[in-house]
Amino acid sequence: MWLRPFSNQGKELMESNGDHETDIQVQADRRFKAIRVLVPVPIAILAGLYWGHEGVRVTLDTGLVLLIAADVEGLRIWGEALGVWAPLATLLLMVIQALAAPIPAVLITVLNSLLFGPIVGAVWSILSATVAAVLCFGIARRFGTPLVTRLVPDRVITRTERFMDSHGATTILAARLLPVVPFDPISYGAGLTHMRLWTFVWATALGQIPAGFAYSYLGQEIGDPMRLLLLGVCAFGVLMLIGWSFRKVMRDSDD
């Protein structure tokens, strides 16, 4: 006689757990949709300003003409004329690419180089990319696995968590040093671990320094496509060598 009530209670508990998991997934779906809806908003606002405000349209058209003409000095002057709006715009672009990935981050780094010079542009690109990475980290830390699995494949999360548990901050450094590793999934995965925010910040910023300065200096060669291509291939090779060397040292330390 006592088996029946116990069985009913277990069934109710399983149903309750299932309902709870369903609620969590529903909330994750809503947050995922909210992120995807909010990301295009700044682009929509800019498009509205472009078509509705002549001053904005003339300013952007001027910048586009200078970019097509590869006029580095003209772009620098144009960027200075924009004042604080120029760095804010490229920061926003870096955040958008981290959340929605519509454009490669390297293009924003080159743009920063053209607008602010190779050194200031590199520093601003590193800071902007760090802010974008911290945002991904914070989203994962705040909303957890149910949301992150909508943004990143499960296998990537599993591998990231495994490497984080074994290597900690060095995983972030290795990922940032290797130019072929997409970093946004790493940022989301790190947010699901016990890694401290400050550890993630300094490892992310430090790991970006070689690529940030390399791509920023490459941006100054936009007027010479052949030289840009040659130096780009060389820079990519050097960055790969640095990244793989660091990764090998990291693996050897475990043996």
Image: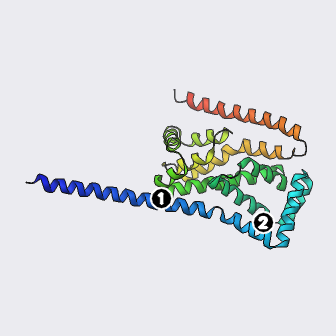
Is 192 left, or right, of 79 in this rendering? Answer: left
Q: Residue at x 83, y 49 (%)?
A: 118
Report the residue that reaches farthest toward the front: 51
| Residue ID for mark 1 | 28
Q: Earlier in the sequence, mark 1 or mark 2?
A: 1
Percent across and percent down for residue 102 are 68, 53
| Residue ID for mark 2 | 85
In the rendered structure, which amino acid carries the disc numbered 1? Ala
Callout 2: helix, strand or loop? helix
Q: Is 201 or 72 nearer to us in this picture? A: 72
The N terminus - image quarter: bottom left
Q: Residue at x 80, y 53 (%)?
A: 111
Q: Is 238 or 29 nearer to us in this picture? A: 29
Report the residue that reaches farthest toward the left: 1
Percent across and percent down for residue 74 are 92, 57
* C-alpha separation, residue under disc 1 versus residue under disc 2: 34 Å
Classify 141 as above or below 82.
above
Classify 41 as above or below 191.
below
Q: Residue at x 70, y 66 (%)?
A: 44
Q: Residue at x 23, y 55 (%)?
A: 11
- Dividing the picture into quadrants, the one containing residue 55 is bottom right
Classify 162 as above or below 68.
above
